[in-house]
Each structure stands twice: as C-alpha cells, then as structure tokens.
Image: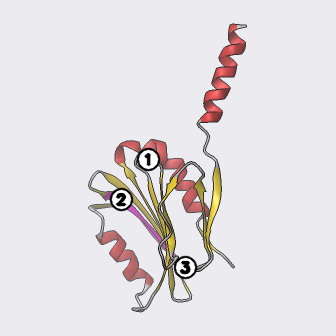
Amino acid sequence: MKGFYALLITLWLTTGLQASFEQYCNARFGFCVDVDTQWGKEAAPVNNDGRSFFDGEGLRVNVRGSYNALGERLREAMDNAKNGLDRVTYETMRGNWFVVSGYKGSDIVYTKVFLHNNTYYTLLITHSTALQKKYNAIVTRLSKTFRLLP
C-alpha cells in the first residue's frame, strides 16, 4: 500500500509541475507564440503592438511587432541585439530571421527576430543565469512556436 501512495504522490507532484500552454496571438501584427497560462501578463499597450509576460520567478517574455520606419536591414538589427549584450554566446541568421543569445549582467537574454514586409517581429526572453536549467525547455518551446500568421 505504501508503494501505491508513493506513486499517487509522485503523479500529483509531477502533473502539478507541468506547464499548461495556450497561444497568444497578436491580430494587429499577425504573429503567435505559446505562453504558460499561469504566467502573469502586463496590460496590453495602447497601440497593441504586443505583450509582456512573466512567471514571478525571474522569467520575462516580450513579444511585439514594429514597423521598420527607418529601413533598417536585418543585419543591422542583429548587430544592435548583439551590442546590447555583455557577451554573445550564440548567433545565427537565416533568410528573414535571426537569433542572438548571451549574457547581460546576471541575466541570459534570448532574442529571435523576423523581418517580413518591412515589419519586425520580436521575441525577447530574459531570465537569471542561475535558473538556466529550469528555463531551457521553455525558451526552446517559445522559440519554436513564435511564428508569423499567413
């Protein structure tokens, strides 16, 4: 009987720790990303260009769209993202998007940007370096689900 209760407790604990995700989609700019239903979110800005989410433990997620009014090239945007970091640990550019990640102070910063029809679509994730193992899978999920709508 002890084993049965241990199994029940284990199942309860592991299912309680599972995140429940839903899509956040921005109708104005036409992009979506999965977000945890337990995260807090800041009020949508008046111009409805995106949203900011947080988990209360150090994770911050910002997603937004912005018009490229200055005609900045994707390489320039990537260089600006890199210049905002103390140390770059990863960078790649393919087609109409790039990813840059690295350290800023005691935080890890992950940025993914698309440029489409002279509009930038940005996913910016920050969290404490100390919580890297906790957030690796979440960062991966957000990066994979961040997409433009057809």
Circle 2 residues within 10 Å: few <14, some 14–19, many ≥20: many
**Which is more foreground, mark 3 or mark 2?**
2
**Which is more foreground, mark 1 or mark 3?**
1
Q: Earlier in the sequence, mark 1 or mark 2?
A: 1
Answer left or right for 67 relative to 85.
Answer: right
Q: Amino acid at mark 2?
A: Gly
For the record, the magenta segment spans 89-103
Residue that extends furthest to the top in the rendered view of this protein: 1
Residue 99 vs 126, above or below: the answer is below
Q: Which mark is residue 102?
A: 2
Q: Earlier in the sequence, mark 3 or mark 2?
A: 3
- 100 inside magenta stretch: yes
Q: Amino acid at mark 1?
A: Gly
Residue 26: image quadrant is bottom right
Residue sitting at x 29%, y 51%: 106
Would you say residue 140 is visible in this rendering?
yes
SS assignment for the magenta stretch, majority: strand
Q: Which mark is residue 56?
A: 1
Label 3 – label 2 distance at C-alpha: 22 Å
